[in-house]
Amino acid sequence: MKIKQASSNSTPLLHSNADDNGPHQLYVHPIKSLRPIPLSSAELTSTGIANDRRYMLFKHNPSAPDPSKRLQRMTVTFFAELGLFTQALSESNDGNFTVTYNPPPGGRKVGGREQKQLEMTFKPDTQGLDETEVDLHGSKTKAFTMGWNVNEWFTECFGWEVLCVYMPEGSTRQVLGNLSPNAVASGTKSRSSNSWFSSFTTYVPESLKGKQKDDGITFADCAPYLVVTEESVKDVSSRLPDGAEMDVTKFRANIVLEGAEEVYEEDYWGAVSILPSATAEEEPADRNSGGLEIVLTQNCIRCQSLNIDYTNGIYAKDEAGTVLKKLMRDRRVDAGKKHSPVFGRYGFLGSNGNEKGGRVKVGDEVMVSKRNDERTKFYWPGL
């Protein structure tokens, strides 16, 4: 398998060009739930691709009687308007990225009616910024509320008050449930859950056994990495009308692999190793020792975000708005979430003992280094 180059369009398309497996596309989402940036190479870290999901948007309701309702987290599942925003690397500064608001062709009843851009930095100076607590799926962290210029820009685009928060380097959220390979290796249970599932069967490699540090995540939902295959994306496209293609970015993955032998075989993958191109002439065993391992612990449970019409920032009204329903037919295969379909695998950096990770690029070879005998069973308290 290989990572394949994404199109230069704002919505990258899939293009098959090889029979072997590998990283097909790489994506980073600086602001959670906005459309991602396609990358030709990426730095893999223990908390995900560098700069992934360090920012998040909230709808601010300061007059809400219930204090817990005054900050409403904005995700594309519930705020389809987030699909109107694209992100791109800055052309003038390697440490910045650009957010572009693309109003729908027919306009909106509220919010901005003209295209506009905002340049942001991946690592802002947090001195003087207000600190706030963010609770995402029961996993809390401290974050900083960005300044007036950023918040006002998003407020004008949406038509309601928006706060943008930033989680600085070194800050993380706790991984709950049975997703963390470290929790399984140590035999402990999540501090925020009341029970442990003995049916958890995911492979835990030697590279993760004995780690003392808990796994941490940014504003990604459940894990630092999400891996999907082009072959499975093509299966979703086959369920749409002739000529229609499923937009791979709607799956919100970081790594798209090409070359799987079977559709949805990733359901059974326990780990994949990304092998640097520079060692392509070496024997597989040698390359595996120098590669970066992604340990795949659980399935990704899918929701209505697959049905978003990115052009108009609404739930699609044509066949594209039925993708979730189409997957309901035969992809409800996780015993932990029997009523929801599965697509892709959540992963954590194993790195063969190197916790700092390393750099990978489109075209690097990937090996499935472990296969599970059975599908895993997802559990995250409250989800």
Image (cartoon, helix red, strand yellow):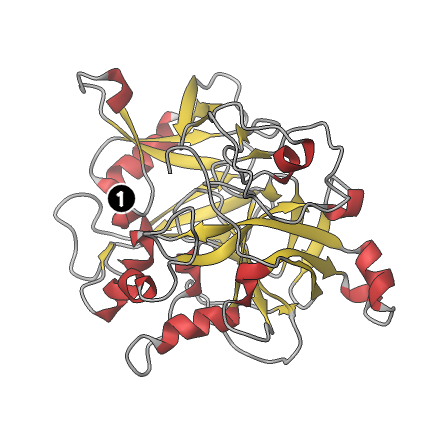
Q: Is residue 303 left or right of residue 232?
A: left
Q: Nearer the viewer, residue 33 or 274?
A: 274
Which quadrant: the C terminus? top left
Type of amino acid at the residue the image marks with label 1: Phe
Q: Position of residue 130 (x, y in %)?
A: 43, 17
Is residue 159 depicted above or below 6 in this figure? Answer: above
**Residue 309 visible in the snapshot:** no
Q: Position of residue 287 (x, y in %)?
A: 83, 62
Q: Position of residue 62 (x, y in %)?
A: 22, 20
Instruction: Name the residue tied to disc 1.
Output: 78
State the SS at label 1. Answer: loop
**Quadrant of the rendered image containing residue 210:** top right
Q: Is residue 217 left or right of residue 294?
A: left
Q: Nearer the viewer, residue 91 or 342?
A: 342
Badge 1 density bin: few <14, some 14–19, many ≥20, Cα 10 Å: few
Is residue 70 depicted above or below 348 in this figure? Answer: above
Q: Is residue 120 left or right of residue 330?
A: right
Residue drawn 16% across and 51% down? 108
Q: Position of residue 299 (x, y in %)?
A: 49, 52
Residue at the outermost front position: 198
